[in-house]
Image: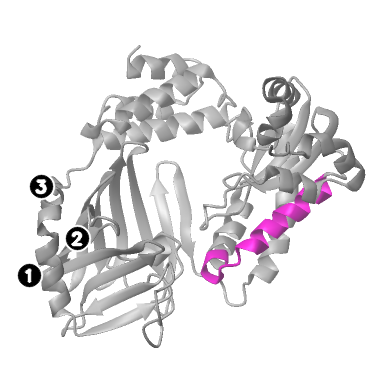
């Protein structure tokens, strides 16, 4: 089946208004244009969610076909730096010599502090490093950054230290352009080549060719105030992804809001906290609303068999959006299959949500609405800015404990348990032990015990 026929197989089962049909048809007609393909994808997702067909096979086939179009290298933006990237290994020695010779002073920081990409820290939700008074004694700690400045106070060299050495970036400042050449720590193989277009002292464009992908960004200003960012990126895994961001400022010209804008609507990427807003205030509000959304989600889930576990799944690698967690359900049939196939080693599967069918599945509603979006946009910013990650985990762990004492609208198997875990760290067993009441934990003990190593 072609991409269009797979789309038709799904949309033929969905009722749409004439306006929706016209908009979707116009976008479908432009496939494989990347912008149109992404628009079709967004519209299909919205239709499936509205009609409760996210588990429909035809819907998933349509999405897979669209994703295949976006993963095609032909969908990648035109960057024009392939030759520069290929030549980088031969240029490294000369670039390093030229850039380091231009350095007249060094700055040391506990993390990233100087970035050319406009609004880098806000867009990537990354906390700024702290400037150190002097160079560290001995080998720099992993995460330390060093910046070499030239006589015009421009960054010419960046070193990002880790346990193996340091990644290196070298910068050439040319008329109307800044070139960034980025090399890995081990063999100084190129990681990326990035060119910035400069006009009237403002960065108006960015092109990057990297080992695993490429991207283009354009920046639109009102005076010196950045107002719109348009991005197009591609890699073999995610395919082509485009974003438009709109930037707002308050009456004192301070950055106030960065919104992602698409046919699906607006979402706050970054927002200035109101005066006095703190995690101490926000986390209890999130806990209360999270509890409400869990019950609402469970009422919407249709499961034809008993469930042995409900997990509030945290992604510990998503430092910039830890909250809210997502739900994962372990089915009794899966538990029985794990035990039969793996025996004493089933513990390595029973409490790992990524092994479950109903993990990160569209049949399980997200714990997300307008109120949660508002609460978590600010809270997640404060969490990563202040590095209060443990506070987020504690909120979710406490809710898991509470839910074990509740009557949940779910077909529960004997010894059903609610727990939370960081599914990227594989700590499900520890999560069950933290959340389960004493009597339940005692009954579950045989399923929590790992076999002794011989």
* Residue 83, numbered circle: 3
Element assignment for label 1: loop
* Residue 181, numbered circle: 2
Task: Say whether residue 113 is visible.
Answer: no
**Of 407 and 350, which appears nearest the observer?**
350
* Residue 175, numbered circle: 1
Element assignment for label 2: strand
Which residue is depicted at the point 26% across and 64% down? 168
Q: Residue furthest bottom?
A: 133
Q: Where does the image place residue 402, in percent across and percent down from the top left?
A: 83, 50
Q: Quadrant of residue 37?
A: top left
Which residue is depicted at the point 72% across and 20% down? 340
| Residue 200 within the magenta-colored segment of the rendering | no
Cα separation between marks 2 and 3: 13 Å
| Residue 396 within the magenta-colored segment of the rendering | yes
Where is the C terminus found, in terms of image quarters?
top right
Q: Residue furthest left?
A: 175
Q: Is 443 left, or right, of 343 in this rendering? A: right
Which residue is depicted at the point 36% across and 58% down? 246
Above or below: residue 251 compared with residue 346 = below
* Residue 125, numbered circle: none
| Crowd around label 1: few <14 · some 14–19 · many ≥20 (10 Å) | few
């Amino acid at each position: 089946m072609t991409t269009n026929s797979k789309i038709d197989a799904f949309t033929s089962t969905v009722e749409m208004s004439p306006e929706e049909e016209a908009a979707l048809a116009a976008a479908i007609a432009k496939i494989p244009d990347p912008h149109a393909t992404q628009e079709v994808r967004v519209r299909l997702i919205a239709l499936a969610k509205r009609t409760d067909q996210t588990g429909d096979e035809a819907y998933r086939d349509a999405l897979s076909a669209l994703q295949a179009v976006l993963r095609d290298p032909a969908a990648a933006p035109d960057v024009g730096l392939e030759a520069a990237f290929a030549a980088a290994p031969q240029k490294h020695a000369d670039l390093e010599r030229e850039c380091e010779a231009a350095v007249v002073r060094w700055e040391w920081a506990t993390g990233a502090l100087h970035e050319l990409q406009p609004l880098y820290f806000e867009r990537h939700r990354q906390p700024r490093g702290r400037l150190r008074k002097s160079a560290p004694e001995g080998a720099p700690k992993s995460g330390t950054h060093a910046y070499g400045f030239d006589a015009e106070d421009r960054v010419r060299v960046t070193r990002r230290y880790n346990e193996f050495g340091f990644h290196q970036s070298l910068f050439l400042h040319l008329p109307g352009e800044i070139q960034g050449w980025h090399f890995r720590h081990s063999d100084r193989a190129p990681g990326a080549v990035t060119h910035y277009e400069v006009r009237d002292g403002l960065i108006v464009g960015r092109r990057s060719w990297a080992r695993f992908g490429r991207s283009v960004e354009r920046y639109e200003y009102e005076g010196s105030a950045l107002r719109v960012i348009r991005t197009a990126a591609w890699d073999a895994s995610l395919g082509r992804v485009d974003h438009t961001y709109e930037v707002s400022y308050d009456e004192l010209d301070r950055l106030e809001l960065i919104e992602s804008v698409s046919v699906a609507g607006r979402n706050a990427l970054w927002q200035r906290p109101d005066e006095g807003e703190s995690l101490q205030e926000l986390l209890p509000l999130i806990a209360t609303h999270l509890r409400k959304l869990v019950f609402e989600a469970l009422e919407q889930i249709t499961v034809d068999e008993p469930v042995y576990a409900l997990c509030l799944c945290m992604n510990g690698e998503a430092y910039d959006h830890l909250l809210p967690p997502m739900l994962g359900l372990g089915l009794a049939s899966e538990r029985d299959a794990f035990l039969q196939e793996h025996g004493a080693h089933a513990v390595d599967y029973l409490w790992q949500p990524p092994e479950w069918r109903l993990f990160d599945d569209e049949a399980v509603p997200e714990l997300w609405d307008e109120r949660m979006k508002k609460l978590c946009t600010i809270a997640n910013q404060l969490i990563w800015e202040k590095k209060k990650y443990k506070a987020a985990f504690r909120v979710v762990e406490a809710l898991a404990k509470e839910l074990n004492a509740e009557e949940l609208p779910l077909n529960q198997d004997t010894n059903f348990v609610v727990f939370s875990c960081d599914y990227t760290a594989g700590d499900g067993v520890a999560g069950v032990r933290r959340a389960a009441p004493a009597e339940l934990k005692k009954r579950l003990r045989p399923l929590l015990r790992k076999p002794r190593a011989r």
